[in-house]
Structures are given as structure tokens and as C-alpha cells.
Image (cartoon, rainbow, N blue to C red):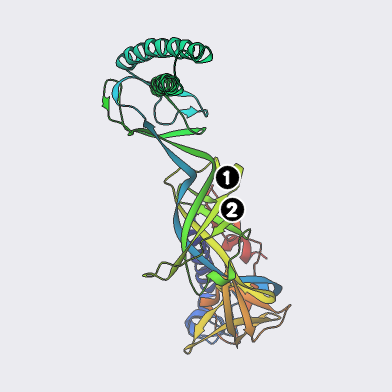
Amino acid sequence: MIPHIRGRVALAALTTVAVLSACGGSDESAAAGGPGGRGGPGGFGGGGQASPVETAVVVEGDISRVVVLPGTVEPIRTVGVNAQVAGALLELSVEEGDRVEEGQVVARLDDRELQAQLRSAEASFEVAEASFDRARQLLERQVITQPEYEAERTGFEAARAQLEQLRTRVGFTEVRAPIGGVVTTKLMQTGDVVGNQGRLLEVAEVDTMVVRVSVSELDIVQIEEGDAVDVTLDALPDDVLQATVRRVFPAADPTTRLIPVEVALSSADGRRARPGFLARVSFQLDPKPNARLIPASAIVSRGGGEGVYLVSDSTVVLRSVTPGLTAGGQIEIVDGLAVGDRVVTLGANLLRDGGRIRDVTGQRAAVGAEVDTFGSPAQEGGQ
């Protein structure tokens, strides 16, 4: 159950139990307005009927200021796959979501024109090679001059370069994946005519997933590479993923004064996330060790200030406190309480200073699969 709904149900249960208990007094007492009746001083929080509450002890622990920033899950690297020669696309063998290996052939282009040019270049190279061999022999017998020999050698080198160029261009008609990863975008289909350097696909390296967020210049000084952070995803609202700060960018945006920070999800958690998921990164800043902590639900507002109901035997005393940081459902108490003090955490809205209580901490019983409530009034009346 969602935490705030669970809290409301529990609070409603406390109110119901209290009302039923108040109605449990004798009719005579109620009519007379005697102790415990509706008109007497023993109403809730008074000296009569005890109000059921839950309590907790002030503990010592660590707390930090939590800064939560939104971002988007991205692959650590995304590479475009382009056609390096123009031509008709004869085959595009992958779809979005397919995993490819580095060097795997993912597409083929029509190479018939290039093959014809290659055969012509091979023939020209053979002629140039034969002429160059003959010129070398003639030079050795001093039949031709050195400039004539150099001209034949130059023709041979040009023919060889032309042949190597065409072989390379023919090789480009087989398009290969530059990295291993997952195909995230497919921009062309078989049969399309592709221009030189036309984009066919995008391949993402999803083994490491990252989230990039923008951090205030006031907070960035407390963030370092390697710091552990928590990440939650809207797609997995009940799970907290582990991540670390991968890099802190060196410069702030001159307009927003925000500095990009990139966090990397752990390998196990990264496999559960997908590119494009909305993420929220929680940074733990300003850590305070050995702080006095209580559940945040214990704080009540009275007379324009904040306080708690301090338990003293079976009664409560309203105590003013100075709250500090709040995180994870707990709040730091800077002043007003000591470690070991017991305070009311649930049911404080029914109380007043000096009122009697009945501590039912841990006595809630599950009713059905989702709803939490307290024991029935019949059971309580028989105690």
C-alpha cells in the first residue's frame, strides 16, 4: 500500500477506536456529565478515557540533506551507423531492439557499379605493373633514361592506389556495426536509396546506463566522483537502484548556473532500466552523524510553533522542539529532546497537554490483504 494512504487508514482507525471507547461509558455517566462522559473532564486528552496512540523512542543516528534531481536514463554511448558510399539499400538485417556485435554486417548496398569500376582498375593495374617491370629492366641495360623510368613508376603507383581505393569502396557496401550494443533507432528500410554518409541506424552500448542531472553550484562542491547515490524510476516506483557519480563536468551552464553530473547505474540495476526512462537521483549532502532522530509524524503544530507529545508514564506532555533536517521519514531534533525519550508518533491529533494515553504500539493487526487497523473495541473492553 502507498505509505501516505496507509498512514491515513491507521489514523482513521485510531479515531474510530477512540470514539467507540468514549461511547463505551455508562448511559448514566453520560447523561450526568460525570467523569468519562461526553460532558465531563475525562474526554480525549483529559483525565478520563485514555487515547490509543503509537509511540517511538528518540534514537541517535546519521542524517543528511537529500537533494532529489530529475533526469533521463541514457546509454553510456550511442553511435550512429552510416553508409560510407551512396547506393540502393539491398538489405538491412536488424530491427530496433536487436543486439549486434562489433563488426557484424547489418546492411548491404548495391555494389554492381563499384564492382565494374574495380575490374577496370584491376586491368589498368596489370598493364601499369607490366610496363613498370619492363622499364626497370630497360633502365638496368641503360636503354631508357631515368626520367622515363620515373614516369613508368609513377603510372604504376597511381594504378595501384586507384585499385586500393576501389577495393575499399566496395568493402564499404557492407555496413558493419562500429560497437556492440542494441539497435535503438532504424532510419532506413530495404530498398531505400542512401546518400553518401547517410544515417541508417543508431546503436547504443547499454551494458552501462547513466543518468545526467543538473546540479546547483551551491551543492556541486559537496559532490565528488565515486560518491554513492540512490536512483528511483517512475517505471519501478518501489525499487531503489544503486548508482555512483561517474563524472562531474568542469563548467557550469552560463545561463542556468547548473553543472551537469553523470551517475552510472550498477550493472545489475542498469539491466532493469531502459533508455528514456524518467529517473530521480538522490544526493546525500551535509551529513550529520550522531543526530537525535524521531519519526517525522511525531511533529505537531501548536500555537504557531512545533512540538511533540512526550510520554510520561500514562500521560503526555507537550514539548516544544527545534527540528532540523528531514530525510527518509525521520526528522532531526536539534533541541528539546534527549536520546531515549519516548514520543507519540500516531494519534497526536486526539491529544492535549496532560492527557492520558494507552500505548498500542505494535498491536495493529492486518485486516484483509491491504488495510491496517487496531483491535476491536469489544476485545479492548474485555481487558
Residue bearing mark 2: 243
- Find residue 127 and report its image quarter: top left
Q: Is disc 2 surrounded by few (<14), some (14 to 19) or many (20+) residues within 10 Å? A: many
Q: Secondary structure at mark 2?
A: strand
Mark yes or no: residue 116 visible. yes
Q: Quadrant of the C terminus?
A: bottom right
Q: Are marks 2 and 1 in contact (CB under 8 Å)?
A: yes
Helix, strand or loop status at disc 1:
helix
Q: Is residue 346 visible?
A: no
Determine the CA span between mark 2 and mark 1. 8 Å
User: At 30% across and 31% down in the image, what residue appears?
Assistant: 196
> Counting other residues with Cα less than 10 Å from the Cα at mark 1, is it few (<14), some (14-19), or many (20 or more)?
some
- The relative height of residue 319 versus residue 177 in the rendered view (above or below) is below
Q: Position of residue 298 (x, y in %)?
A: 58, 75
Q: Nearer the viewer, residue 134 or 13?
A: 134
Total number of numbered discs in the rendering = 2
Q: Residue 235, position in %: x, y? A: 46, 47
User: Depth check: 35 or 326 in front?
Assistant: 326
The residue identified by callout 1 is 269
